[in-house]
């Protein structure tokens, strides 16, 4: 049976189980003289039996499905003679693809090694077998579980508590997904990064000044190994983020201050949503805007002033990224400024301070931890921003801090290395994961500090 | 006005500082105004720029040809023979019509330029036409066919203030266009193909239909996964979670994940979902999975806020009539918190709809012509389509890209407006 | 007596009916002596509105030089609102409107020649809840002199800070930790810090809005002593909820009721033989 049909069958079985459980509890109720003499409502008895039927079988199904492919390919590989046994992951993928295509008939069997033909036949057979096995097993578990649940029923059974316990367990599982996600991210980047660092020493990656991951196709070509010094990427990322922050921090902060402290409610009700539009614009749109409008504008302006500006300048990407971050900073700053108690303002104003003196010398210092937290979050965003830099910054890993030059960033390289063909055994592809690891650790650190600072700040004025 | 009293020494000193301080005050206010104007200017520029570039794409240039469905040219003897129809030379038909219209054109080079006036989709159009109206065989009719993208760009730019954009069109082609204009045989028509077609290498045939359907499939998966899981997680954290390390750890993780760069989720999708669990690439399922993981924190955070906003008296009343905590949550708290949760979910979905970076890594950048028909068909999504087109060298794609952005923004603005309305409703209730 | 109480509860529950039917109120004119010769502050026909709602009704009141005047009355009767008219802190409230004549000596407080910065430097204020800035103790006190440019040099500034802290009776407690944050002090110390901050720019008048309501009895006693000392140099207007406090520190006491000034008299007279029935009802604790 196909997996989708099997799932439907299991659902039907669970529904039946519900019905039988329900009926049986009604039977108990009749003997005892009414539903009120049961421990729980009949629906709970029904649900309990349905869970006994559905839960173990579906769990089993998913576990088996998750490992089915891996096991089948292991079995196939063991049957393949040594001379065509793959030595690298790329070869392995190629081989598996070939067998797959042979099995599905997409590849004609003419002139193919008999060992492969055998493997293709075996693949079909194994798939078929596993499908049958799975169907039988799942049905058996569903039936057995359902019967067990049904058989163990009694009027005193705490059916509702049991059902609710499972329900809460499900909720806990959902909540814990956040942890599993973090774990998954860590595992996925660390695993491949470790393999990368086996090929390229970590010191070269962290401190090397040259980045050219283009490994040669054939090993005998020159520059076959590529160089993986990530400093130009780090510097490029920092340069663009710095430009972005020099735009976003003053503009975001000043507009937040103006809106919170000076603007009347009419101005506020118009300007705030208008600025928030900037926050809702997808980054790919900013990237397009940067590449097609801002970058040529900057280049032409620069050229007319006699400067040499590349058409993929760090300035264009940084500027547009800054525009993207303005509403982020402004809304965070607005929050923290509004959290400063009114008595603080009054204290300063009553001393004869002007409004701007009050803001500069009392409100901003009071709100500073919150503002710093917000800026840190914004920096983490700038570092992790991808589309703007992919579209408007270049690929050239120049070691420069000249904003009119082309630089590349960590995210640009991750995308470039992973879009298209990936070879999970070459340093080139793996280096993307090492960059990902760096990115994750840095942004995680920034976020963690920022969130703590902001939280502390909020508590201070609670 | 009463006479001023004689100021004391302190007042005297303060008065001396006043002018300077008020100047500083004015300057500070000015900075604020400038900052706001800068922000508003950015919004305006962005929109004006994109609409200015993109509005043209909603109309496409068509050329009127008088087509003679000549059986000899087509090589069809029996109109009902599908095989013959499939092999018929409709391209020859188009060429013939063009040669008839511009009968003075001779020479291989000129002819080739002439044929390039119309899109190569013209022959498919005529094929479909003859299939639906077989009686036309041997007859002739006037038919509007799609112009080539270079001609389209040139024709549209004819009336622009910065002068005509010649691009790759030759002088001859420009003369032919002029002659078509004089004869009223070239015009702009509403570009419905833009909304129905998939991607194409030919800009005039490229549409966002495939990308929109891909986005819908992907978003459906995202919603189906992240909404129930997000709500369940929020309910657990707000209503049942004991105060312990594990709960704290979950919270820290959720807050941090909300701020993790989206590209990292692409790495997760590639390494875990594709390489480990063997989910196929380039399909809405994998895109939806990755986006669901990405939007989950947003949905959890806003759902928690919505649950928090339900007054405790409701819970107390429920417990008071003997309901179990689970029943109270399911029957009383959730229905009241639902609008708030939906608001957060819509905002999360809008985020997912606009997301590009993680999808690049899981193969959703593929060039896909067909409109996907299911969750496991190769697909791309709207923002990725924009990214792909933005990279294309053809001038006509600039217009298409901007128009696709307009459509994407329209979706996002609608979703966000909806969320705002929902939230307003909600606020009114308490 | 019972008729009066009933009348009172009726008016109290219909606060808003004043606009429509002012003749219903028991208060017509202020009794006692609200006016003095050569006053420091003169308010005539003072009214304050929050939007459409009137909070203060046509008050006439003089405050003498170096006088301590206490303002008492049930909460919401407009004491703070009246107080904040004197240093124009009501300007900072959206929709708040003030009418009437207010003079600080000969200067019109709301006149176009009056600069609000200068006014607030001349009329200091201490708030109900201590509100030190998130700065060091030193910087809290130095804030006023610095923004107003009152100290020519660092030495002068040190001097001003030391003097202010001494006059606020805080110097001995904090002189060794001037660089520590002001928010780290105890509530009573914080309030004295705020008083030091207010006197650091040598105001002529100090407004105090329930300065002790957030403090314990010992800290309160300390502040009350301080007020008595300060009275030698400053005119002090103090709003208080505690009648004992009013009795201890003030020369005259003004009783407010629902935005009207009911009675102003020598403090001792107000607390022993009040002229107005409402005052009597309040001080004998029948409402408040
Ligand atoms: N900012 C404000 N906006 C609107 N009404 C206010 C505001 N501040 C005070 N009020 C109203 O004015 C009246 C007097 O308040 P207030 O002066 O604070 O009284 P008191 O200090 O005597 O307790 C009250 O009815 C109060 O509700
Ligand atoms: Mg008050």
Image (tube, coloured by chain):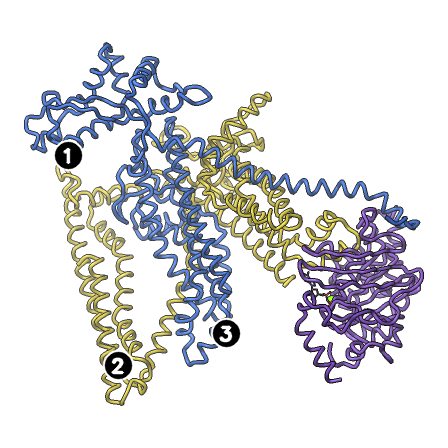
Chain colours: A yellow, B blue, C purple
The answer to whether the beta carbon of the residue marked 2 is less than 8 Å from any atom of ligand 1 is no
Give the side of residue B391 with respect to residue B312, left or right: left
In this view, the mark in front (1 or 2): 1
Give the side of residue A121 with respect to residue C19, left or right: left
Q: Nearer the viewer, residue C222 or A191?
A: C222
Subunit of label 2 = A
Q: Nearer the viewer, residue A17 or C103?
A: C103
Q: Quadrant of residue C69?
A: bottom right
| Residue A235 location (% of width, % of height) | 55, 37
Label 1 secondary element: helix
Asked if labels 3 and 2 touch by Cβ distance under 8 angstroms, the answer is no
Residue B169's place in the image compared with C280, above or below, is above
Give the labeled residue for mark 3: B313
Q: Residues within 10 Å of mark 3 (few under 14, many from 20)?
A: few
Quadrant of the image where one finds ligand 2: bottom right
Residue B132, which numbered label?
1
Q: Are marks 1 and 2 on the same chain?
A: no
Q: Residues within 10 Å of mark 1 (few under 14, many from 20)?
A: few
Residue A152, which numbered label?
2
Label 2 secondary element: loop
Query: Measuring 85% from the left and 45% from the top, which residue is drawn there?
Result: B15
> Residue reaching furthest bottom?
A32
Label 3 secondary element: helix
State the CA–CA distance, disc 3 to disc 1.
68 Å
The reply to whether residue A376 is in sight is: no
| Residue B69 location (% of width, % of height) | 14, 24
State the CA–CA distance, disc 1 to disc 2.
67 Å
């Amino acid at each position: 049976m196909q997996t989708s049909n099997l799932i439907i069958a299991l659902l039907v079985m669970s529904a039946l189980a519900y019905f039988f459980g329900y009926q049986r509890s009604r039977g108990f109720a009749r003997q005892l003289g009414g539903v009120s003499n049961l421990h729980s409502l009949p629906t709970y008895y029904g649900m309990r039996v349905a869970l006994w039927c559905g839960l173990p079988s579906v769990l089993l199904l998913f576990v088996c499905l998750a490992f089915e492919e891996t096991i089948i390919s292991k079995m196939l590989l063991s049957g393949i003679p040594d001379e065509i046994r793959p030595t690298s992951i790329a070869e392995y993928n190629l081989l598996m693809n070939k067998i797959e295509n042979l099995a599905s008939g997409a590849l004609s069997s003419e002139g193919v090694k008999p060992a492969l033909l055998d493997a293709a036949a075996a693949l079909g057979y194994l798939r078929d077998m596993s499908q049958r096995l799975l169907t039988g097993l799942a049905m058996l578990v569903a039936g057995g579980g359902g019967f067990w649940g049904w058989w163990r029923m009694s009027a005193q059974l705490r059916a509702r508590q049991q059902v609710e316990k499972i329900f809460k367990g499900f909720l806990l599982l959902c909540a814990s997904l956040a942890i599993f996600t973090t774990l998954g991210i860590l595992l996925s980047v660390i695993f491949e990064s470790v393999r990368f660092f086996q090929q390229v020493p970590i010191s070269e990656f962290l401190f090397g000044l040259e980045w050219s991951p283009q490994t040669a196709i054939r090993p005998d070509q020159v520059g076959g190994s590529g160089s993986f010094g990530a400093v130009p990427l780090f510097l490029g990322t920092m340069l663009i983020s710095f430009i972005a922050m020099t735009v976003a921090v003053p503009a975001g902060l000043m507009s937040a201050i103006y809106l919170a402290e000076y603007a009347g409610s009419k101005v506020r009700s118009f300007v705030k949503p208008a600025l928030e539009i900037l926050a809702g614009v997808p980054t790919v749109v900013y990237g397009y805007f940067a590449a097609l409008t801002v970058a040529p504008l900057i280049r032409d302006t620069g050229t007319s002033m006699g400067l040499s500006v590349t058409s993929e300048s760090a300035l264009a990407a940084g500027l547009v990224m800054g525009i993207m971050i303005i509403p982020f900073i402004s809304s965070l700053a607005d929050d923290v400024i509004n959290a400063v108690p009114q008595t603080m303002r009054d204290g300063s104003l009553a001393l004869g301070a002007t409004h701007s003196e009050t803001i500069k010398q009392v409100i901003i210092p009071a709100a500073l931890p919150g503002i710093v937290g917000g800026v840190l979050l914004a920096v983490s965003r700038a570092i992790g921003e991808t589309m703007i830099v992919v579209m408007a910054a270049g690929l050239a890993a120049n070691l420069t801090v000249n904003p009119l030059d082309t630089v590349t960033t960590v995210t640009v390289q991750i995308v470039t290395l992973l879009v298209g063909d990936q070879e999970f055994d070459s340093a080139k592809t793996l280096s993307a994961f090492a960059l990902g690891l760096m990115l994750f650790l840095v942004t995680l650190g920034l976020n963690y500090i920022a969130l703590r600072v902001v939280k502390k700040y909020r508590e201070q004025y609670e | 006005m009463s006479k001023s009293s004689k100021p004391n020494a302190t007042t005297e000193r303060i008065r001396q500082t006043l002018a300077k301080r008020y100047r500083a005050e004015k300057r500070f206010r000015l900075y604020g105004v400038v900052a706001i104007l800068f922000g508003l200017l950015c919004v305006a520029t962005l929109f004006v720029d994109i609409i200015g570039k993109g509005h043209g794409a909603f109309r496409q240039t068509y050329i009127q040809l008088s087509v003679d469905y000549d059986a000899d040219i087509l090589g069809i003897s029996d109109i009902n023979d599908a095989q013959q129809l499939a092999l018929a030379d409709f391209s020859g038909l188009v060429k013939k019509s063009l040669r008839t219209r511009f009968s003075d054109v001779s020479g291989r080079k000129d002819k080739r330029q002439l044929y390039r006036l119309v899109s190569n989709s013209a022959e498919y159009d005529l094929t479909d036409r003859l299939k639906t109206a077989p009686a036309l065989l041997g007859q002739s009719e006037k038919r509007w066919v799609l112009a080539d993208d270079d001609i389209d760009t040139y024709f549209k730019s004819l009336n622009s203030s910065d002068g005509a954009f010649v691009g790759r069109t030759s002088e001859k082609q420009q003369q032919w266009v002029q002659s078509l204009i004089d004869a009223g045989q070239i015009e702009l028509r509403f570009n419905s193909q833009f909304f129905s077609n998939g991607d194409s290498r030919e800009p005039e045939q490229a549409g966002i239909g495939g990308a929109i359907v891909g986005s819908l499939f992907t978003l459906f998966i995202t919603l189906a996964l992240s909404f129930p899981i997000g709500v369940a997680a929020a309910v657990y954290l707000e209503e049942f979670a004991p105060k312990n390390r594990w709960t704290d750890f979950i919270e820290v993780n959720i807050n941090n994940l909300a701020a993790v760069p989206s590209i990292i989720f692409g790495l997760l999708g590639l390494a875990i979902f594709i390489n480990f669990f063997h989910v196929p690439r380039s399909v809405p399922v994998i895109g939806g999975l990755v986006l669901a993981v990405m939007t989950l924190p947003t949905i959890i955070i806003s759902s928690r806020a919505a649950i928090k906003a339900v007054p405790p008296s409701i819970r107390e009343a429920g417990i008071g009539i003997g309901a179990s905590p689970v029943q109270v949550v399911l029957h009383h708290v959730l229905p009241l918190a639902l609008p708030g949760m939906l608001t957060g979910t819509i905002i999360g979905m809008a985020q997912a709809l606009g997301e590009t970076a993680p999808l690049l890594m899981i193969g959703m950048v593929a060039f896909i012509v067909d409109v996907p028909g299911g969750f496991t068909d190769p697909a791309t999504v709207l923002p990725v389509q924009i990214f792909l087109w933005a990279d294309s060298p053809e001038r006509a794609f600039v217009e298409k890209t901007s128009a696709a952005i307009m459509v994407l923004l329209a979706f996002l603005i609608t979703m966000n407006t909806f969320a705002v309305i929902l939230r307003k409703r909600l606020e009114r209730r308490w | 007596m019972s008729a009066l109480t009933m009348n009172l509860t009726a008016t109290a529950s219909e606060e808003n009916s004043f606009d429509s039917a002012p003749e219903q109120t028991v208060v017509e004119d202020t009794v006692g002596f609200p006016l003095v010769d050569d006053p420091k502050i003169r308010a005539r026909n003072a009214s304050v509105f929050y939007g459409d709602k009137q909070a203060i009704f046509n008050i006439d009141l003089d405050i003498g030089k170096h006088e301590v005047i206490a303002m008492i009355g049930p909460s919401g009767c407009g004491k703070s609102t009246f107080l904040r008219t004197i240093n124009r802190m009501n300007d900072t409230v959206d929709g708040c409107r003030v009418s009437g004549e207010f003079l600080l000596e000969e200067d019109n407080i709301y006149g176009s020649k009056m600069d609000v910065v200068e006014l607030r430097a001349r009329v200091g204020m201490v708030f109900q809840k201590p509100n030190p800035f998130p700065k060091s103790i030193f910087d809290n006190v130095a804030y006023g002199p610095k923004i107003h440019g009152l100290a020519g040099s660092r030495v002068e500034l040190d001097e001003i800070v030391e003097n202010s802290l001494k006059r606020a009776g805080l110097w001995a407690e904090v002189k060794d930790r001037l660089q520590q944050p002001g928010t780290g002090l105890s509530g009573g110390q914080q309030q004295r810090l705020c008083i030091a901050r207010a006197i650091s720019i040598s105001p002529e008048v100090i407004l105090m809005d329930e300065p002790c309501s957030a403090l314990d009895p010992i800290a309160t006693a300390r502040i009350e002593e301080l007020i008595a000392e300060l009275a030698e140099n400053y005119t002090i207007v103090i709003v208080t909820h505690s009648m004992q406090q009013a009795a201890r520190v003030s020369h005259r006491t003004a009783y407010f009721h629902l935005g009207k000034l009911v009675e102003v008299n020598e403090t001792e007279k107000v607390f022993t033989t009040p002229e107005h029935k409402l005052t009597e009802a309040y001080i004998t604790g029948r409402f408040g």
